[in-house]
Image (cartoon, rainbow, N blue to C red):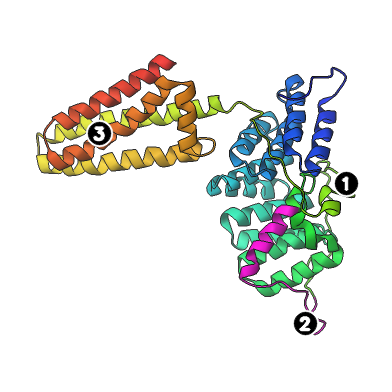
């Protein structure tokens, strides 16, 4: 779980050690430092947010989302926790939720340069459009001298295929900070957002190159030259002068080998809810189909087949959204740790399949079998509580 806990070491000291280790690409050791800090302060939002960033940098979105959710629960009004949650949701392909969080960030911190540019970039990842472009421009207005604001504007503009604007914004970012050109090769989490946006711009290079405009081009537009004060901006980590990438090129990155937070309870709770919904829906659908047989067996069979497919597809799609990580590995983990609940889940998947069987062959036996499987799934869920 990490290094032995030193009673004189504060959670912030553990976090600073983790930042240094992550800057060297040693994400596994950085996660161990956070684990040591959480052993003495399990609800410390800054530690949880830093852990989420480590997992994001290590391309572990399920673990990142779990840490980010707990960070937001501990500090729901903190900008840094909302940012990592939006990133984790986006990396988990839960774009609708990520867009809502990004919009909330833009609304709550309109004069914060970091919030505006980060919210704009995250919104463009999830739901690109005029709102994201307006927010990116606002980020330039709030902090016209910050290179990352222009980098975000370049990314948002390129995603909207406004390549001329993207070229000028990227050129301005390079003028303000030439290191932007190599930001995609950096490691660590202090400048994680900068690397994220640089990588996004690099991926868009297939659509259009983003060279520095020539002297003949019109000047870069600066419609918002006056920065606004941002008293509500939280303190940001100061980036180190050098990273491991600066003297070794592309460093070897060691990802966390074991989870710091226990995800089994999150997986079990999500699967329990999905199985319960599937079982209850199948029971109701089977009873309704049986009642419809008294009116017209043909209509009953057609309705049962359709609703059975809807129930099964809806439950699987919903579980894919709420289960941390991918559904297949989550069910495999559940089979190893909680077989009755895993059995309830599989029974809830099998029960609605018998409704299309009834639609195909008719008779009451498939309906009764579906009701029995759904009832068995529901009873297993109740006994596990």
Q: Which mark is residue 285?
A: 3
User: Residues under labels 1 and 2: Cα distance?
Assistant: 36 Å
| Residue at horizontal 70 percent and vertical 60 percent from the top | 136
Q: Earlier in the sequence, mark 1 or mark 2?
A: 2
Looking at this view, is 82 or 14 the one in front? 14
Is 132 covered by the magenta stretch? no
Q: Which mark is residue 217?
A: 2
Residue density around tag 2, few if under 14, some if 14–19, many if 20 or more, within 10 Å: few
Q: Earlier in the sequence, mark 2 or mark 3?
A: 2
| Image-quadrant location for residue 356 | top left
The nearer-to-camera label among 1 and 2 is: 1
Residue lying at the far bottom in this picture: please name it: 216
**What secondary structure is found at the residue carrying circle 1?**
loop
* Vertical order, 255 against 375 (above or below): below
Specify the segment rendered in magenta. Answer: 195-219
Image coords of residue 59 (percent x, y) = 64, 44
| Image-quadrant location for residue 291 | top left
The mark total stands at: 3
Image coords of residue 206 (percent x, y) = 62, 69
Residues tagged 2 and 3 counted as in contact (Cβ below 8 A): no
Q: Earlier in the sequence, mark 3 or mark 1?
A: 1
Q: Is residue 78 visible?
A: no
């Amino acid at each position: 779980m990490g290094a032995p806990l030193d009673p004189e070491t504060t959670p912030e000291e553990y976090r600073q050690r983790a930042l240094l280790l992550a800057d060297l690409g040693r994400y596994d050791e950085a996660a161990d430092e956070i684990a040591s800090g959480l052993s003495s302060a399990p609800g410390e939002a800054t530690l949880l947010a830093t852990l989420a960033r480590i997992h994001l940098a290590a391309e572990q979105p399920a673990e990142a989302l779990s840490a980010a959710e707990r960070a937001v629960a501990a500090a729901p009004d903190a900008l840094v926790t909302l940012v990592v949650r939006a990133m984790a949701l986006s990396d988990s392909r839960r774009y609708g939720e990520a867009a809502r969080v990004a919009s909330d960030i833009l609304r709550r911190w309109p004069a914060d340069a970091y919030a505006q540019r980060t919210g704009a970039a995250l919104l463009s990842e999830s739901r690109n459009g005029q709102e994201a472009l307006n927010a990116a421009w606002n980020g330039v207005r709030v902090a016209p001298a910050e290179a990352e604001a222009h980098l975000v504007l370049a990314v948002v503009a390129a995603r909207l295929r406004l390549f001329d604007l993207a070229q000028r914004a990227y050129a301005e970012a390079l003028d303000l900070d030439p290191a932007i050109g190599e930001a995609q090769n950096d490691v660590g989490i202090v400048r994680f957002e900068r690397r994220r946006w640089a990588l996004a711009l690099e991926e868009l290079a297939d659509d259009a190159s983003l060279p520095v405009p020539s002297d003949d081009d019109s000047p870069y537009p600066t419609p918002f030259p006056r920065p606004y004060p941002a008293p509500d901006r939280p303190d940001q980590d100061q980036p180190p002068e050098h990273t491991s990438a600066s003297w070794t090129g592309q460093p070897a990155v060691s990802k966390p080998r074991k989870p710091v937070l226990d995800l089994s309870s999150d997986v079990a709770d999500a699967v329990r809810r999905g199985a319960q919904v599937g079982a209850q829906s199948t029971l109701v659908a089977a009873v309704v189909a049986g009642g419809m047989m008294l009116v017209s067996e043909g209509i009953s069979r057609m309705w049962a087949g359709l609703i059975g497919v809807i129930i099964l597809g809806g439950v699987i799609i919903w579980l894919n959204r709420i289960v941390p990580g991918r559904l297949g590995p989550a069910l495999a983990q559940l089979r190893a740790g909680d077989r009755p609940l895993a059995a309830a889940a599989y029974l809830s998947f099998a029960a609605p399949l018998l409704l299309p069987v009834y639609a195909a062959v008719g008779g009451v036996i498939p309906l009764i079998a579906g009701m029995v499987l759904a009832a068995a799934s529901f009873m297993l869920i109740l006994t596990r509580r």
